[in-house]
Image (cartoon, rainbow, N blue to C red):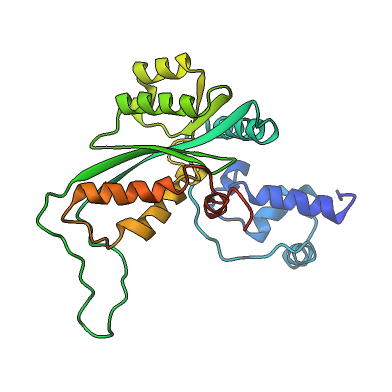
Amino acid sequence: MTLSTPEAAKAEIEHLLHDSPRQHGIARSRWRLKDLRRVVAWLQDCTLPGVHQILRRLKVSLKQATSYVESPDPRRHLKRRRMGYAYSAALYHPQQYVILFHDELTYYSQQNEGLKYGPVGRQPPFVSHGVAENKMTRIGAVMDGMTGQVIYLQADKFGKLAMAQLYRLIRQHYPERKVFVVQDNCSFHYSDNVLATAAELDIIPVYLPTYASWLNPIEKLWRWLKADVLRGHEFAHDPQLLRQVVAQFLDQFADGSSALLRYVGLLPI
C-alpha cells in the first residue's frame, strides 16, 4: 500500500507519533522502527533500514524529548473551546462583549527572597524583616484581555464575599456589555452567593481546566508585581505601607496598558 503524496505520508506518521504505542497493541512507551513498520500499512514490506530512509526523507528522526504538563481535567478541551469563544466574542465585538482574566494572589509583609546586587564576596545583601507581624494580604483581580485594564481588591482575606464584591465592581466598570470572567476552579467560585451574584449581574464565569494555570495570562501580572515590588522589599516594618505600594503598582493599569498585554502574551512584542 502507498500514499499519494509525501505530505500525506508525513502527516500520517506525525499523527501516529502523538499516540502511545500501547494504543496500537504494542506494550512499549516509545516507538521503534519495527513498531512503526508493524502499524503503518505502507511500511510493512520495507526492511528496517528502508523504514529509516523513508523517515529521513519525511524529515522525521529521533529527538531529545522534553517534558510538558497537561491538565488532567476530562473536560479540558471543552473548557478551552469556551475560552476561545469568549475571547473571540470580545475581540470581534468589543462593544458587546468583554473578557476578563481573574486570579488571586497571597503575599506576606516579611519576605526575604529574590536576587539583589551587592559586592562580590561572602556577605550577601540584606533584606530587613523588621519587628512587625508577618501580615498576610490577599488580592483578587481581573485583567481585561483586550485593553489590559486591571480591577482589584486587597484585604486580609479573599473568599466568597470578596468575590461577589469584585463582581459588583466589575459591573460598575462595564455597565452595558456582556462580561466573561475566566477563572480557576477554587471552591468558593462555585458558592451559591458568588454564582447568584454573577447571575444577577449577567456575568458569565468561564472556568479554566483544572491545574492549567498557564492558560491564564493574569498569572504573569503577579510575576511582574513580585519582580518590581515584593521580592526583597523594604516595607517589612509597615504592612499597610506595603499594601499602598502594591496598590500603586496595580493602579498604573487602571486605564488599560498595551505594555501589560505584551508582557502577559496577549499582544505581539
Point 22% across, 57% down: residue:
235
To which quarter of the image does residue 178 belong?
top right
Give the camera-side residue of 121 and 21. 121
Q: Position of residue 36 (x, y in %)?
A: 69, 54
The residue furthest right is 4
x and y, in percent, of residue 105 in the image: 34, 43
Depth check, front residue: 227 or 253: 253
Q: Position of residue 87 (x, y in %)?
A: 61, 35
Residue depicted at 45% across the width and 19% down the height: 198
Q: Is 73 above or below relative to 246?
A: above
The quadrant in which the C terminus is found is bottom right
Residue 80 picture quarter: top right
Q: Residue at x 59, y 40 (%)?
A: 146
Can residue 74 be seen here?
Answer: no
Please give the count of numbered marks on the rendered protein: 0
In this rendered view, identify the residue nearer to me: 47 or 182: 182
Nearer the observer, 84 or 172 = 172
Residue 166 in view (yes/no) = yes
Residue 265 percent coordinates (x, y): 57, 51
Q: For the view shown, which residue lies furthest in the left direction? A: 131
Whether residue 93 is situated above or below residue 24 in the rendered picture: above
Q: Is residue 235 above or below residue 76?
A: below
114 left or right, relative to 252:
left
